[in-house]
Amino acid sequence: MRKVIIRKAGYDYGTLRPVFFEIMDGLGGKGIARNSRVVIKPNLLAPASPEKAMTTHPLVVKAAAEYVLERGASPVISDSPAMGSFEKVLKESGIKDALEGLPVQYREFKKPVTVAAGAPFRTLAIAQDAVEADVMINLPKLKTHAQMLLTLGVKNLFGCVVGLSKPEWHFRAGIDREMFARLLVEIYRLVNPSFTVLDGILAMEGQGPGRSGTPRDMGILAGSGSAVSLDEAVCGMLGIGADQLLTCRIAKEMGLAEGDIAIDGEIPVVRDFKFPLTGSLVFGPKWMHGQLRRHFVQRPESDDSMCALCGECWKYCPAQAIKRKGRKLEFDYDKCIRCYCCVEVCPHGALKAVDTLPGKLLRKITKR
Ligand code: SF4
Ligand code: SF4
C-alpha cells in the first residue's frame, strides 16, 4: 500500500507546526539521521508574496526546517527559481523573515552534475546538491499549470534543473507535453525525495502557475514518501482521474505507482476546482501537430496596459518567439511552442494564455 497522509491545516503556526510534525512522523521522518544534510526543496518559482499562492508558504518551510533541526540534522533550503534571484525570492516569499534566527543554510541549486537517465534522455544534468543530499524533503505548492494541468509533487522537482538549462529543456521537451512529463518523472526518479509534503492550504486554480492563476483556500497539508502517490491522491480530491495528469500516467508506465493508495485522514471532495485550459487540442499524427498547435492551442497574449516592457519574457522564451516592437510585444506564433514559460515568469501579470477562435469552436464541438 502506498501511504498518503492528509490533514486539515491553516497558516496559524501554533497549529500548523504540530500538523506538519505529525505528517512527517507518520512518514517515518524520525528516521532522519543526526548530522545528515537535509535539502528542503520548496516551490520558489519567482519573487512573490505568500498571498499570491505562487510559492510554498514560508511557515510550511519553517516547520520543515524545525523538524529537521529537532532530528539533529542540518537543513539546507534550495531551489533554482525560474525568474528573479534566489535571494530576492527568499525575501519576497517571506521565507527569510519566517526562518530568521534558525540555523539553516540557503544554497541555490547552481552546480549541475551529469547522471545516467532512462530512455530517451540517457543522461541529464541535475543540481549536484539535489542528487547528493542525504535526505530531501520536497515541499510543493498545490497549483494549476497551463502546460501540465497541475504542478504538484513530481513537477516541483523541475527546480532541480539548474538555471538556464530550464528554458532549453522546455524547448526540447516542451514541444511535446508527453516528453516533458517523461522528463519530469525521470528527474523525480533520479532525485528520489524521501518525503513530499504539499502546501495545499492556500492553493491556486485557473491559469496558474504564475500571476494569472487565482489563489483558492483549500485548507490541507498532504504528505507521502512517494510524490507520485501524493499527486494521484490530489487528482482524486480534485475530481479527475490520475491518468489525466500526464506525470502520473507516465510514472505508472514506468512502474513507479504499483499497488493501491492508502489514505490516512479525510480527503476532502472538491468538485468545482477551476483547471486551466491546457493545450490538449493537439491530437492525431505527429506531422499535424505543428498546424494544430498554431491554430487550435491557446497562445500567449499580452495586455499592453499592464506590460512594463521589463524583458523577462523575451529573455526567458526558449523559442525566441517574443520581440519588443516599440511600446508593444510581438509574438511569432510559428516559432512559439506553447510552453507558457512567458506567462509563468511575467512579474506584472501582463501575459495570459488565450484561446484562438478555431480552438474555441473545436472545444465546443468536441467538449474538450
Ligand atoms: S509581458 Fe511581462 S515579462 Fe514581458 S515585458 Fe511585459 S511585463 Fe515584462
Ligand atoms: S512565446 Fe511564451 S509560450 Fe511561446 S515559446 Fe515563448 S515562452 Fe513559450
Image (cartoon, rainbow, N blue to C red):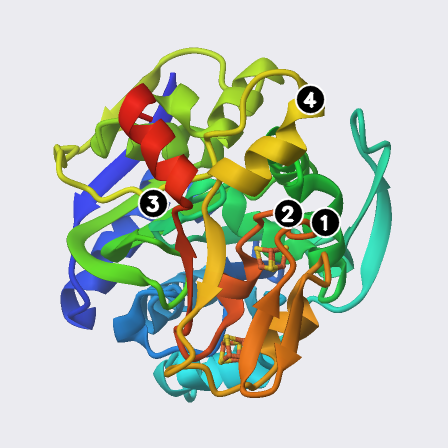
Q: Is residue 360 left or right of residue 163?
A: left
Q: Quadrant of residue 283?
A: top right
| Label 4: which secondary element | helix
Q: Indicate which disc, 2 or 4, sits on the residue closer to the N terminus.
A: 4
For ligand 2, tell me if the residue under mark 2 lies within 8 Å: yes
| Label 2: which secondary element | loop
Name the residue rendered at 60%, 87% in the picture.
Answer: 326
Q: Indicate which disc, 3 or 2, sits on the residue closer to the N terminus.
A: 3
Asked whether the residues under the numbered discs 3 and 1 touch, taking CB atoms below 8 Å apart as contact, a structural biologist would say no
> Measured along the vertical axis of the image, is residue 96 above or below residue 114?
below
Q: Is residue 276 left or right of residue 336?
A: left
The label shown at residue 171 is 1
Q: In the image, residue 57 lies at what x, y percent?
A: 33, 68
Residue holding disc 2: 337
The residue type indicated by label 4 comes to: Lys
Residue holding disc 4: 286
The residue type indicated by label 3 comes to: Pro
| Label 3: which secondary element | loop
Q: In the image, residue 58 lies at what x, y percent?
A: 35, 72
If the picture is divided into quarters, which one holds ligand 2? bottom right
> Measured along the vertical axis of the image, is residue 265 above or below residue 101?
above
Asked whether the residues under the numbered discs 4 and 1 touch, taking CB atoms below 8 Å apart as contact, a structural biologist would say no
Name the residue rendered at 46%, 67% in the picture.
Answer: 69
- On the question of residue 103 being in view, the answer is no
For ligand 2, tell me if the residue under mark 1 lies within 8 Å: yes
Asked whether the residues under the numbered discs 1 and 2 touch, taking CB atoms below 8 Å apart as contact, a structural biologist would say yes
The label shown at residue 276 is 3
Using the numbered discs, state the Cα–Cα distance from disc 4 to disc 3 in whole angstroms. 24 Å
Q: Indicate which disc, 4 or 3, sits on the residue closer to the N terminus.
A: 3
Near mark 2 (Cα within 10 A), the count class, few <14, some 14-19 or many ≥20, is many
| Label 1: which secondary element | helix
Looking at the rendered image, the disc whose residue lies closer to the viewer, 1 or 2, is 2
